[in-house]
Image (cartoon, coloured by chain):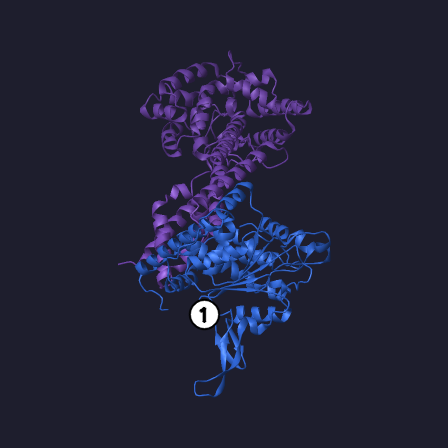
Amino acid sequence: MPTSSELFTARLAGFRSRAWLVLFANNLCAALTIASATLISAQLLAGVPRPAGWTWLMVTATASGVAAAVVSYLGRPTLRTTASAIDRALALEDRVIAGLQSANQDDVISCLVVREADKALQRALRQDVFPFRSRRYGVLAGVVFGGAVVLSLADMGRSTTLRLSPSAGGAGAGGGTTAAATATPQRDSNAPPTIASSGERRSPRLSNPGPAPQDDARPADIKPEAPSSGDDRRADAIGVPESQSSSTGATSVNAGESTGRQQQDSVPAGPVSEASAGPATASAGRSPSSRLRGAGTQGGSSDARQAGRGAGGVSGGDVTAASSGASARMASTASSRSFAVAARAAAEAALTRDDIPPELRRYVRDYFRALQGKAPSSRTGPQR
Amino acid sequence: MIPSHSPVDVETQAATFRECFAHLQREIGRVFVGQRDVVDQLLLCFFCQGHALIEGAPGLGKTLLVRTLSDALSLRFARIQCTPDLMPADVTGTNLLIETPSGGREFSFQRGPLFANVVLADELNRATPRTQAAFLEAMQERHVTIFGVTHTLEEPFSVFATQNPIEMEGTYPLPEAQLDRFFFKLHVRMPGVEDLAEIITRTTGVAIEHATPRFSIGTVCDMLALVKRVKVAEPALRLVLRLVRATHPDAGDAPETVKKYVRYGASPRAAQAIILAAKALALVSGRYHVAVEDVRPLALPALNHRIIRNFHGEMEQISSETIVERVMQTVGE
């Protein structure tokens, strides 16, 4: 049978827990606000590395929680401070703290003091004494954190666009596109935006298989009738003249697939790679057009259809239609090297005309340098 | 007295205390008009077994107040009118050579007026310092020593001294060390018009009101013991200590007024007086512990006569009350 002093102390401990919880909530609001504001500032300020992406948001939220927990633990209320707070909040004329002082004494007056304090605590409600008054700060923290989320999402979308732009025309092949999604890891959100080279885009599975006798058949001289949006993006991004851009547009017939590939980034890699394995392997050693045909007309199999669906959410039928139309136009005999050299020249000309943002010029140079360097080896791989 | 070991007994005693306090307030109020705060502070002083210095102009009822208190408790009352020729033996008593029934002679101690429960020393500042010292020694020690024999004073024992602040000629102002022996210093002020009209009505008629005693000395002594058993909450204790500390000019948290006008601050007796009186006030309020709310109204009567002003304070006529109020404002909870 617990004594009245023990009951009183236990009741007071409950109030202390509530006080601790309120303290943690307040600290969490403050920490989340500060961390989110810091994140937003870093994203908006120039010259500062731009943190973006889910990782940074998770780090922000986790760090805020940890900081709030640590600060709350260090400033945790004692029974004495809790008793004082209760007395002040409910105007109890120091009854609770006097009861706490007398809890360990066994004289008659102490018993009466403890009893009075216990009565006062029984009448009190924890939420009245320690209410969550940080609703305003909670809203503020939520708004600031939401702003950080929005900015990060916007930044992620921008970086995805930057990454996809140069490949919209060049990596048009359905199999290659799918392989790129499986072989290229998701770019780290805080890494600078990179334009993947052709080597990066090429799947190991696709670059290795057997001979590629028709590598010389490049679509450089193909003029697309209606450039896709992917073509436009690419032309805007690297400043390739329209003629060059249209020549590359031959391979960007599958721009629809490229667009679909943007969505594909969020698709789990496993099924995609499995789906792409069939048609990719089947079309190894063929030109893109034939491979596309394989995935479309010949590869009207379920695997190919699966690949088309898995790659960009486009059904196999769509892929078939797109690839069959493209194959009719992809009858170029121009070498990839000549195409790369011409494109590089155009790009460098664009660089000198300040059409390329200064921070992206390096990537453009790297891209074409890599393209030129990889061109001979690409003979063994699928056409781009 | 053996303290009660049952909560029920203590609660009964506390209820009796509250009843007695209310009875005294009521009975004194029937005779003494107005000045409720002075009455309450006088009662607190008595229940803490302290001594009070009552200051006020002549004719404001100081003597009546103390006599009424004694009457309402059926205690032994003694009044001493202090004059410059008053001797210590006149106050404490002395040995007289008397004849025995057998024809012999021997010294017999004749008790002075100090051997009463409530002693009124009227115009104490008119007595010589030697007589004042006899008073104050009895007040502090609660016994007198005559020819090497110690005589214990009665319980309860309280001395209420009065002094007239406007007729200072031919007086011997009490030294600070002796002022410190007084528990409270109470100021009786001129009553308002309504109170004055009531005073005239009551005192010029045929019927004169008298206080009716109700509680015995034993009951009063039980209540006095109960006061000392009351607990003190830590915030209240800290407030008292900060108050007393802030009256010293060398204290870091002392207000600027204290640093400028005070030569020496309140002694630890001031803290003792505030805490004891707060205990009695807590019982009156129905609590068994002292809260911060009990301390605030008691700071002024306990501190105002314990603050010694410096030359600047006296020249600029900064009263002790002003200094205490400034200290109260500075020292929050």
Q: Look at the picture and state if B278 lies above or below A280.
A: below
- The chain carrying label 1 is B
* Left or right for A10, reference B209: left
Colour of chain A as rendered: purple
**Residue B322 appears left or right of A91:** right
Farthest residue toward the top? A225
x, y percent for residue B72: 42, 57
Q: Is residue B2 visible?
A: yes
Residue identifier under label 1: B154
Q: Please state the horizontal and vertical placement of residue A195, each as a whole percent of the image.
A: 55, 30
Quadrant in the rendering for residue A276:
top left
State whether residue B62 is above or below residue A293.
Answer: below
User: Looking at the picture, how far across and down is residue A153, in whole percent?
Assistant: 49, 30
Q: Nearer the viewer, residue B183 or A156?
A: B183
| Viewer-nearest residue: B248 or A126 | B248
| Kind of residue at badge 1 | Glu
Residue A76 in sight here: no
Quarter of image, res A361: top right
Q: Residue placed at 36% from the left, 24% from the top? A: A304
Chain for colour blue: B
The answer to which quarter of the image holds residue B13 is: bottom left
- Please state if B60 lies on the left or on the right of A179 as rendered: right
State how many labels appear. Answer: 1
Q: Residue at x 55, y 16 (%)?
A: A246
Foreground of the two, A142 or A310 = A142
Q: Is residue A347 above or below residue B201?
A: above
What x and y, as percent, mark residue A269? 40, 33
Q: Quadrant of the N terminus of chain A?
A: bottom left
Crowd around label 1: few <14 · some 14–19 · many ≥20 (10 Å): some
